[in-house]
Image (spheres, rainbow, N blue to C red):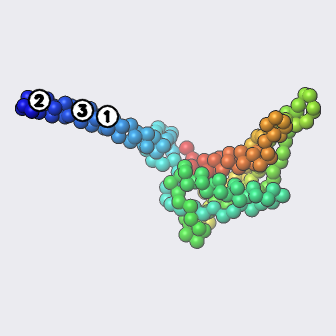
Amino acid sequence: MNTRAILARWCAAASGAARRGRFTALVAASALVVAGAPLTGCAKDPSDGWSMQSAHPQGYRTVAVPIFENKTYERDISRNLTDAIVKEIQQSTPYRVTSPAKADTVLRGSIRHVKLRELSKSLATGLSEEMVMQVTVDYEWVDMRTGKPIVSRQGFSGSGTFISSLPQTEPIDLGGFNAVQQMAADIVASMQADW
């Protein structure tokens, strides 16, 4: 192989590496922007505009979530709600879930009632077609050092729909699951700092 052929191959390889390098740099820059996007938000002070700080209160690192007290006859709903809240905290907040003995804060609550309501009836049979399960809770997020509530809500409701008639015939548990998931997302969203 002559020198000219070797030089041509080397230049082609270098050119390909440069293109790959630019592509890699573009991918890395895009990943950095996407990863940093959830960290931005509105500042606490409206005159400050956007902020790169977390939307969650500073000064807390851990939260304990004991099983919510259940004042209804729905057996598994308190365990399901607590599990959904723990998963939502782990996914969307900077806090680590831990035991009450090690926690900076505790999120506790009680399920007050669970209601089933009919949304629509079949014109042919008169039977319920679409139902909604509504769950109402009281909860508070408390600073363990001071004993003062950070967030406290009474009569907080969430709901989930399901189709109870043929041909779908979804189980009532689907309505409970939807209500619990929505409520967990809303409760954890209330843990953000006030705007």
Q: How far apart are the two marked residues, 3 and 1, measured between alpha carbons? A: 10 Å
Can residue 140 be seen at all in this image of the molecule?
A: no
Q: Name which quarter of the figure residue 86 lies in.
A: bottom right
- Element under disc 3: helix
Pointer 2: residues within 10 angstroms few (<14), some, or many (20+)? few
> Mark 3 or mark 2, which has the lower sequence index?
2
- Element under disc 1: helix
Q: Which residue is drawn at 60% across and 63% down?
A: 64
Can residue 163 be seen at all in this image of the molecule?
A: yes
Q: Name which quarter of the figure residue 11 lies in.
A: top left
Q: Mark 2 points at which residue?
A: 5
> Mark 1 or mark 2, which has the lower sequence index?
2
Three-letter code for the amino acid on which mark 3 is drawn: Gly
Asked if disc 3 and disc 2 are in contact, CB closer than 8 Å, the reply is no
Compared to 69, does 134 lie above or below?
above
Q: Which residue is drawn at 84% across and 37% down?
A: 165
**Where does the image place residue 125, in percent across and percent down from the top left?**
93, 32
- Element under disc 2: helix
Pointer 3: residues within 10 angstroms few (<14), some, or many (20+)? few
Q: Mark 3 points at which residue?
A: 16
Three-letter code for the amino acid on which mark 1 is drawn: Phe
Q: Which residue is drawn at 31% across and 34% down?
A: 23
**Where does the image place residue 122, in percent across and percent down from the top left?**
88, 31
Q: How far apart are the two marked residues, 1 and 2, measured between alpha carbons? A: 27 Å
Compared to 74, does 162 lie above or below?
above
Three-letter code for the amino acid on which mark 2 is drawn: Ala
Numbered mark located on residue 183 in the image: none
Q: How far apart are the two marked residues, 3 and 2, measured between alpha carbons? A: 17 Å
Numbered mark located on residue 23 in the image: 1
